[in-house]
Image (tube, grey):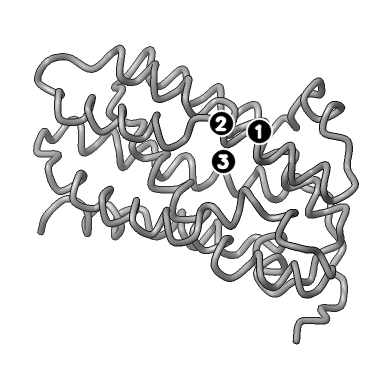
Amino acid sequence: MSFFPRLISETAPGQLELASVPQIQDGLTGQISLQTYIAYLTEAYHHVKHTVPLMQAAKARLDARHDRFRHALDEYIAEETGHEAWILDDIHNCGGDPEAVREGRPRDATRRMVEYMYDYIETANPMGFFGMVLVLEGTSVRLAIQGAAAVAASLNLGPECFHYLSSHGEVDQEHLVFFQRLMDEVDDPEDQAAIVVVASEIFTRFADVFRAIPHDRVAAHVI
């Protein structure tokens, strides 16, 4: 078995844990309030703003044997730069306060997830970062394709409120194909183990991020 299907298989419990979070389940069917959507965007801002710095940190710690993955991180960095600004625009267009979000602090679950990733890159194996890529890109594709349309219809919000999520639909599907091929090039057992460990940990920590978002289920009005 090549590495990518094994990665998916070995992280199945984490995938199920994340998928079972009520905030995600209700978001996918449009059963969330505007306040919950803004709270989601707020936490997204506080971890997305670290995406490029995390990639840069991982790249800096990869040696010459990992040039293929250094180049892949360059591509990711080019793609991901500036996404946090899209989130602030979405918050503004939803009637929220983007400056308060920019100057504010993340919830503890978000902070712990980001801190874990910085620490793992610095003290363990920077290849582990690709485990976080699996979690965030896979989740964003599902939220973009299914959740954005449901929330837009339920809350009667226009496309100007979903720049961040909408950008992660078709594009991130292409990213996932790229990611699968990239992971099948990982042949070092220690690198493979690091990616599995981080993916499993981030699935749980990302589930905690969503669980911490205030949420009361509301009736969906999806047509």
Q: Residue at x 38, y 59 (%)?
A: 173
Type of the residue with mark 1? Ala
**The quadrant where residue 166 appears:** bottom right
Within-10-Å neighbours for mark 3: few <14, some 14–19, many 20+ = many
- Name of the residue lying farthest toward the bottom: 223
Q: Counting residues from the N terminus, which is met first, the one under dot 3 or under dot 1?
A: 1
In the picture, the disc for residue 205 is: 3
Type of the residue with mark 3? Arg
Q: Counting residues from the N terminus, which is met first, the one under dot 2 or under dot 3?
A: 2
- Reply above or below: 60 against 171: above
Query: Which image quarter holds the C terminus?
Result: bottom right
**The quadrant where residue 170 appears:** bottom left
Say which residue label 1 marks: 85
Q: Position of residue 5 (x, y in %)?
A: 22, 59
Residue at disc 1, secondary structure: helix
Q: Residue at x 60, y 65 (%)?
A: 20
Type of the residue with mark 2? Gly
Cβ atoms at labels 2 and 1 below 8 Å apart = yes
Cβ atoms at labels 3 and 1 below 8 Å apart = no
In the picture, the disc for residue 69 is: none
Say which residue label 2 marks: 82
Q: Position of residue 195 (x, y in %)?
A: 30, 38
